Image (cartoon, coloured by chain):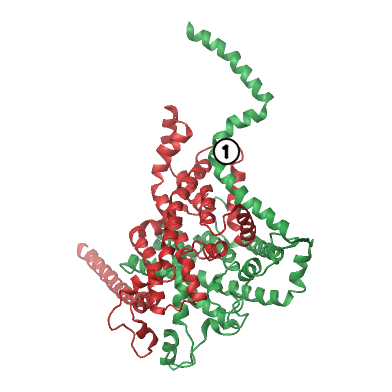
Chain colours: A green, B red
Amino acid sequence: MKTTTDAAKAVPALREESSKKQKKPLKKFLKDNYTGWLFNAPLAIGLLLFTLIPVGYSLYISFWRTNGINIWEWRWLDNYIRMFTIDREEMLLVLGNTFYYVVVSVPLGLVVSYLLAVLVNSTIVKHVNAYRVLYYLPCMIPAVASALLWTDMMKYTASAESMGILNQMLLALGLPASRWFQSEGPKAIASLFFINLWGTGSGMILWLSAFKSIDKGLYEAADIEGASRFRKFCSITIPMSTPMIFYNLIMSVIGSIQYTGTLMYSTGALPGRGSDGESLYMLGVKIYNTSFKISGAQGYAAALAWFMLAVIAVLTGILFKTSKWVFYGEDDA
Amino acid sequence: MNDGTNIVESTAAGILDAQNRQARRKNQILRVVLYALMSVLAVVLLFPYFYMIVKSLKTADEVDNPYSGFFPAVPQFINYVTVFQTGGYGQGIVWTILIIAFNLIAVPVSATIIAYSFAKLRWKGRSVMFTAMLGTMMLPSAVTQLPLYIIYSKIGFLNTILPFTVPNLFGGGAVYIFLIRQFMRSIPNELENAAKIDGANAFVRYSCIVVPLCQPVLIYVMIQVFLAYWGDYYGPLVYCTAATAPKPLALVLYYFITDNSTGTKTNILMAGAVFMSVIPTILFGIFQKQLIEGVTMGGLKG
């Protein structure tokens, strides 16, 4: 008896509640979603404080000549025009170096680490795991320690005896010693490509994980058909790892446009300029210098950062537009 | 009849055997070639590390004298003591440890909370927030570093370790949240549904069911956090410029490279570099499996 009356009471109560809900959509929204937003609050607050506000503020100061503290002169688009007029020569130099770095280091890094991963993914050799660990070890040297180490190894001096060990090796082989990253022109950045080769282990691990997720059945089917190793590599391994190739491609393009590592290899007047004042000078370094080493140029620095963002957006846009070669599995295709 | 089939079988077996032998020999050669190639690569890749260690054990005279040979006459382990008595290296390690200790707690806690909202809760706005979060991965840090510098200067964060700790209370980065979310999605919902019937609210389900199961991915995230702040010189270079500012280990080493006005000898500097590399190496040795497999956990699905 009691239960039925309760139920009878509950029905109109429910109806009342639902009509209330219709009246107050905000309340209903909160009731349905507050747990989700509560858990997500750290992200929402974090994005607001450390991304949205700084991004908006950056756009705002890019229209001023300012030091960020007490000088504020409205300049509208002057900072953006400046890049292509007054500062044109330096921008050409910086962009030339940056694109040279991106265009060589990204494919080189991807290809070398991919080959390394294929090598240690082979089933022919035992103890392959030990080699993986060995190849990854150089990645455990932090960037600063690595810079110190390579600066010492690539030391170039007037007398042959006090040269760094790499030049000693070159001389022992009867080759001329190199100035490495202290050279002028493209050779300086080429030494960075050389140094980067020792960091391919981290890329290798990403590829190995991509290989792991490839369906073993494909290889078994290929074995039954009598496919050669090379054929399996070209027709299964490569196509099936294209999503990872695409992801790594995008991430390394974005990463290397922002490269500031040359801050550590340079001895010029401003950090990053290299010993001849230009050969190691890249966009990320120019933004760092303009932001923190030149007083009153902070508005211009913000404009440069937005220019960098535009470059990244255009490049990733092009990569996404031309991503027909990426294979996302049968169902999605 | 019987004999006939036997002969056929035996010859067929003989041909197969010969083929197998040939294939095996081919494999043998390939194996030797691969071993040689891989070993040479290992030697080349590890040489700089080895060279760094050797040089850190030399005396100051041996470093200066080009004729002293590749190896030190007597390994100078004292260099590792000396380095901590020179130019801020001792304080550097204290600051680095402080920053890392804070982040090792802050990042996993905040990132799992956020990841839980993406992986296990249904709410309006989830996909918008998720896209926004992934969008930050594409945003170059150059855009935010200058405004953050100005904001930090106004709220007194400059020349403290706050710029490397406080932002990590809010998730610590899209990659970590994404990885944990991927991992949480692989945890079956049945476990939580059972708890739900027993009246457990979202917080209880998060802290008592989901987070304990996330241990593998959390170890991966914590190691990555450790490595990131152990080697970070760029952040401190931007935000800790005053002479009295806290200078983490990586920044101390950075100043040694770019402006060694203290005239510290290479052997001592190398000892510092080796110390900076050895700690991550030990960590890698211990958590090698999680580090290599951690990348797999995230995958590219989702």
Depth check: A18 or A234 in front?
A18
Q: Residue furthest left?
A: B3
Q: Residue B137: image x %, image y %? A: 58, 56
Residue A128 figure quarter? bottom left
Q: State the residue position of label 1.
A: A37
Q: Secondary structure at mark 1?
A: helix
Depth check: B163 or B211 in front?
B163
Please report, as a chain letter, where disc 1 is located: A
Q: Work out whether residue A217 can be spotted.
A: no
> Where B301 sits versus A255, above or below?
above
- Type of amino acid under label 1: Trp
Q: Is residue B205 left or right of residue A290?
A: left
> Where A129 sits versus B166, above or below?
below
Q: Residue A57: image x %, image y %? A: 69, 55
Q: Is residue A208 left or right of residue B18?
A: right
x 57%, y 58%: residue: B158
Rate crowding at label 1 as few (under 14), some (14 to 19) or many (20 or more) other CA atoms within 10 Å.
many
Q: Residue furthest front?
A: B244
x 33%, y 88%: residue: B68
Q: Residue A259: image x %, image y %? A: 57, 69
Depth check: A226 or B129 in front?
B129
Q: How many marks?
A: 1
> Where B173 sits versus A160, above or below?
above
Q: Residue B103: image x %, image y %? A: 46, 52
x 79%, y 62%: residue: A75
